Image: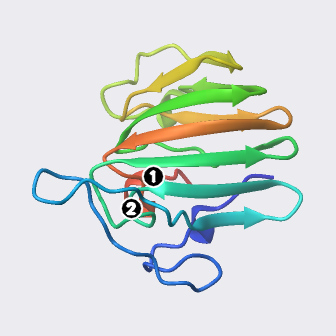
Amino acid sequence: AGFGLARYVYSGKSSNGANVTAKTCSSDVVPSVLSSAPTVVEIPETLKVIEHAGNVGNNDPKLSIATVEVKKATGEPLQIPLYDQYVYIKSGTMKVFVGSDDATKRPVGRENDAPFVLTATSGQVLCLPKGHLYHKTFPGPCEIIPICLPAFSPDLAGNVA
């Protein structure tokens, strides 16, 4: 069972209703420490996502940095994201199925790409460029730190029905 992106909070409030203080990082602001990190997804006994910076974390659309704690095996919906993503595997394993055996499900321009699987373990980083078909899975408990450029949002996630 995967988690739906509809569970993400993109209203400027954390999952407990607290307001999120906006503080983007750019040359026209004073250097600062971001202390508010709202939980944007929490599925009891399965996973928790905390966005430290990004659209929810500090209203910055340029990039997002999150911590994801996976408590048991799960996966995300098929996606063709419109953002580049790096994923640091802090502990455990993440498996990403890239492409599809079904050529009709492959993104435009990637119809001839052969499908393959990436497996990353503790201490490794996945590089997941935008525009590919991904099925991200977690075979067991793990902790990851995804970084998205631009910041994650449901509109850019590219969920495939």
Residue lying at the far left in this picture: please name it: 28
Element type at marker 2? helix
Would you place residue 35 above or below residue 115 in this image?
Answer: below
Residue 100 showing in the rendered view? yes
Q: Quadrant of residue 91?
A: top right
**Quarter of the picture holding the C terminus:** bottom right
Label 2 environment density (alpha carbons within 10 Å; few <14, some 14–19, many ≥20): few
Return the mark for residue 85. none
Element type at marker 1? helix
Residue at position x 30%, y 27% in the image: 109
Return the mark for residue 155. 2
Give whichever of 99, 112 is nearer the camera. Answer: 99
Left or right of 24 in this view: 137: right
The alpha-carbon separation of the residues under discs 2 and 1 comes to 6 Å
Residue type marked 2: Asp
Residue at position x 53%, y 73% in the image: 9
Q: Position of residue 30 (x, y in %)?
A: 20, 59
Say whether marks 2 and 1 touch (CB < 8 Å).
yes
Q: Quadrant of residue 74?
A: top right
Residue type marked 1: Ala
Q: Position of residue 19 (x, y in %)?
A: 48, 83
Left or right of 9 in this view: 33: left
Residue at position x 35%, y 42% in the image: 83
Give whichever of 159, 66 is nearer the camera. Answer: 66
Return the mark for residue 157. 1
Left or right of 132 in this view: 123: right
Would you place residue 43 above or below residue 120 in this image?
Answer: below
Left or right of 141 in this view: 107: left
